[in-house]
Structure formats: C-alpha cells, structure tokens
Amino acid sequence: MKKNRKIFIAVDTNSTSRAKKIIQYTKKLKIGYKFGLEFFNSKNGRSFVSKLKKKIVFADLKLNDIPNTCSSTIKTLRDLKINYLTVHISSGLDSLKAVKNFSGKTKIVGVSTLTSLNDKDLRETGHTRSVKNLVIQQAKLAKKANLDAIVCSAHEAPYVKKIFKKEIITPGIRLVGDKAKDQKRIMTPKKAFENGANSIVIGRSITKGNIRKNIKKLIKSLN
C-alpha cells in the first residue's frame, strides 16, 4: 500500500473486550482506530481510550452544538490525547472556529453529509440541494474554518479535493461483495483512494467475522 494512504479501523462496539481483540489482531499494521459514540458512551469506553498507548486515536464524536458547548467539550477531552476529533460542519462557522481554536495538537475533522443519506433523505429534512452540491458547500466552509481534515463519502471526494487541500477521510468503505447495510454512498477501498481519499474508515467489513482473514483481504485489495 502507498505510504501516503491511511486506514482507520472503526471500532464500532460497546464491548471493551471486543475492542481489545480488534486492536490485538491489527497491531502490526500502521493504522488508526476510530471510536464513535457507541464506544465512548459505553460503561468503560472512555477509560479504555485513555489507556491506549502509541495508537492513532480517532474520536468520532461528531460535535454539533453552539460554539461555547463545542469548545467546552474540547477541554474535557484533553486528557485523552486524541489525534483526530470530528465536528459536524453543519454546526456552523462559529462553532467550527471555536473547536479549532481550542484543539491544540488534535486534528479537527469536519463531517459533511453522512454516508447513510441520499438526495431523497436530504429533501425529507428540508434541504433543496443535492448531496453533491451540499458537500461542495460544506467543503468550502471547512476550508474557511481552517479545519485539518474533512469527512465525505468517496463519491464526493473528486469534487471536495478541488476545494479542500488537506486530508480527505472517506467512510462507507466496503470490501468487494460486502453488503451496504445502512450505508447508501459506499465504495471499495481501492476505488476510494483512486477517487482522491487520503484516508479511509472501514468497520464491519473488517470487524465482523474473522478479523485476521478480513485484514488480509483488505491489504490484498489495495495491492
């Protein structure tokens, strides 16, 4: 795999023993680990993350609130030494700037439009723009806020990279043959990188079933 490409494994579980197994089976690879709301809100999730050593930690907390609440939340997370932290771009420019202002060494990642949504879903929430056009606008806002990275589906990555010149992280990644399930804008790892992603987030295709076997499939698909 090319050196400038990153892989984050989504540790989507509320079980610390399962999280430990995922990390154990992938520890020889140069990858990061994404912990979302499910894990952080589990009984021992935060404590588990606080004890991780020499790991790239991606806290996918998707902050989405007023500037004061977002910046105050950043302060409560400083003891975890998080490498990446997500905030919804839809929270607005002031909130994005507030988070960035208090981020320290943590990279602030703007979340554009969730990969579980399509044009029809957006219309149901009152949006008149297509996914593509909305994500383009969100990329402009991420750039204006000087965020360190942006999350978008690999389908929008070709448009985003023309605007946002920093790290582009694409979730909704599935190995060939895997089902989309609750995601709607998905892509294979290789195609995502070809589309302009610098980093990919892959979860169930790796963590469900035989993790070691799935990792081998992932690495093979990128060679």
Image: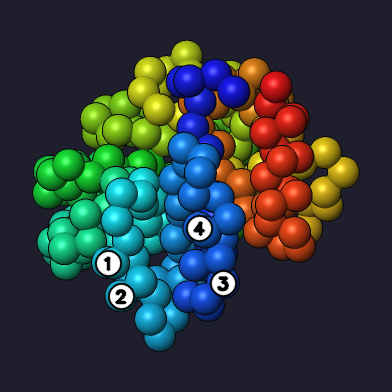
Q: Nearer the viewer, mark 4 or mark 2?
A: 4
Q: Are marks 1 and 2 in contact (CB under 8 Å)?
A: yes
Residue 14 vs residue 137, the one in the foreground? 14
- According to the picture, the residue beneath numbered tag 2 turns out to be 47
Check disc 4 and give the amino acid type: Ile
- According to the picture, the residue beneath numbered tag 3 turns out to be 18
| Residue 210 against residue 194 in the figure, above or below | below
- According to the picture, the residue beneath numbered tag 1 turns out to be 50
- Ranked by sequence position, the earlier of labels 4 and 1 is 4
Say left or right for 1 vs 71: right
What secondary structure is found at the residue carrying circle 3?
Answer: helix
Check disc 2 and give the amino acid type: Ser
Residue 17 vs residue 127, the one in the foreground? 17
Check disc 3 and give the amino acid type: Arg
Residue 71 vs residue 132, the one in the foreground? 71
Mark 3 is surrounded, within 10 Å at the Cα level, by few (under 14), some (14 to 19) or many (20 or more) other residues, namely some
Say left or right for 181 vs 50: right
- According to the picture, the residue beneath numbered tag 4 turns out to be 23
Check disc 1 and give the amino acid type: Ser
In this view, the residue farthest toward the bottom is 43
Q: Are marks 3 and 4 in contact (CB under 8 Å)?
A: no
Say left or right for 83 vs 179: left
| Residue 113 against residue 10 in the figure, above or below | above
